Image: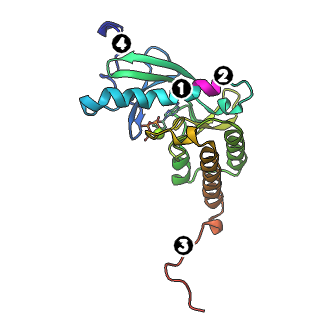
Amino acid sequence: MPEPSTRIRLAHIEPLTSGGSRLIYPDPERPGRLIKVVRQGSVRLKARFQVTRQLRELREYIRVFGKPDDKLICHLPAIAGLIATDLGFGLSVEAIRGADGRLAPTFSQLLRESRVKPHHQDLLATFFDRLLASSAIVGDLSRNNLVLGRDPNGNDFFALVDGLGDNTLIPMYALVPGRNRYRKREAAHRFMAALDAALDPSRRPTAVPSVPPRS
Ligand SMILES: Nc1ncnc2c1ncn2[C@@H]1O[C@H](COP(=O)(O)OP(=O)(O)OP(=O)(O)O)[C@@H](O)[C@H]1O
Ligand SMILES: [Mg+2]
């Protein structure tokens, strides 16, 4: 670990947001970038967890980055690497911004706040087409890991800000590629159905009756 004086100081600032395992800070030295650090937990578990949590994402990003034909890269925030901070090693990533210039809204936020628009269907379809065409391993395709960004040309796009790499001790998706593809297809169906239902409430799936009707 570098000398304390060379570590970026984050402990004194408020994170912009957080997930279940990491705190998301603005990079005080590089505007436009974020630093993701693993939440402080048990000292014993911290070092090991921190390493695997950050490395699995970085490793998978590097793999996708090295494939010139893989268009999924257009839907991933650029990762610059690991960076020493006073909260441990953080992942230095591009901040994906929304139309209002703030951090891009997550897919769950769009649904919760009724902000979905018909053109999001095409954007989501493009994202999933590219995800399915890519060999990238995605262990966690949750609604909080997909955000709606706006690029410098004013075009909206969906970006996967977390979830790359196997998230289990035994790397099931890497060992069984069919399982990775199946999970991606299943996620595509789930996300598209949620978007369709938000745009047209009559398409909301009806609850399955717990008792089958008598014939
Ligand atoms: N590159 C990014 N650009 C914009 N927003 C981001 C970015 N990365 C993360 N976020 C926001 O921060 C939240 C938490 O980040 P992230 O999902 O990486 O944390 P986590 O703790 O690893 O998540 P999990 O709960 O899935 O383990 C995301 O849901 C998203 O709202
Ligand atoms: Mg997450």
- Comparing 176 with 75, the one in front is 176
What residue is pinned by disc 3? Answer: 207
What residue is pinned by disc 1? Answer: 59
Q: Is the magenta stretch mostly helix, strand or loop?
A: helix
What residue is pinned by disc 4? Answer: 7
Of the image marks 3 and 2, the number of the one nearer the N terminus: 2
Residue 136 in percent (x, y) is at 62, 35
* The disc label shown at residue 39, or none: none
- Residue 128 in sight: yes
* Element assignment for label 1: helix
Q: In this view, does 181 lie to the left or right of 46?
A: right
The amino acid on which the numbered mark 4 sits, given as a three-letter code, is Arg
Task: Tell me the residue at 63%/50% (across/down).
Answer: 182
Q: Marks 4 and 1: which is nearer the front?
A: 1
Quarter placement of the C terminus: bottom right
What residue is pinned by disc 2? Answer: 66
Q: Marks 3 and 2: which is nearer the front?
A: 2
